[in-house]
Amino acid sequence: MGVLTGEHRYQACRDEDCQRFACRVYAEGYRDGYADGQAAGFSEGYAAGYAEGHADGQAEGASAAAGSG
Ligand SMILES: [Zn+2]
């Protein structure tokens, strides 16, 4: 207790020139993580979208073949 908390949270800090150590480290890690996350998110999102589209296409094709469309 007695530690300064909540006043300046590095998670919420949007000051790119902030000199607080926690903020600088967090911002750096955030940028790296963001870039990596974007790349990973794209391939993962693509894979997920592809899987869902593939399943939907299969389902539609199946119902059309069954004549219930
Ligand atoms: Zn800050």
Image (spheres, helix red, strand yellow):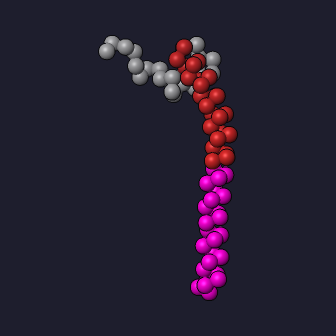
Magenta region, mostly helix, strand or loop? helix
Left or right position of 23 against 2: right
List x then y, in percent, for residue 40.
64, 41
Identify whether 24 is placed above or below 54: above
Residue at point 62%, 87% (across, down): 67
State yes or no: residue 55 in magenta. Answer: yes
Q: Is residue 66 above or below residue 57?
A: below
**Image quadrant where one finds the C terminus:** bottom right
Q: Position of residue 19 (x, y in %)?
A: 58, 13
Please determine whether, in this image, residue 58 is positioned above or below residue 20: below
Tell me, yes or no, whether the highlighted magenta stretch contains residue 57: yes
Choose top left, top right, bottom left or bottom right for residue 55. Answer: bottom right
Residue at 63% x, 43% y: name it.
Answer: 41
Give above or below for 68 relative to 30: below
Q: Give the image quarter of residue 53.
A: bottom right
The structure residue drawn at horizontal position 62% and vertical position 78%, both measured from the top left corner, is: 62
**Where is residue 13 drawn, in percent x and y?**
54, 24
Query: For this view, does 6 lie left or right of residue 31?
Result: left
Name the residue at the left extreme.
1
Query: In the picture, residue 36 is in which quadrant?
Result: top right
> Residue at image x 43%, y 20%?
7
The residue stretch that appears in magenta = 45-69
- Give the quarter of the figure containing the N terminus: top left
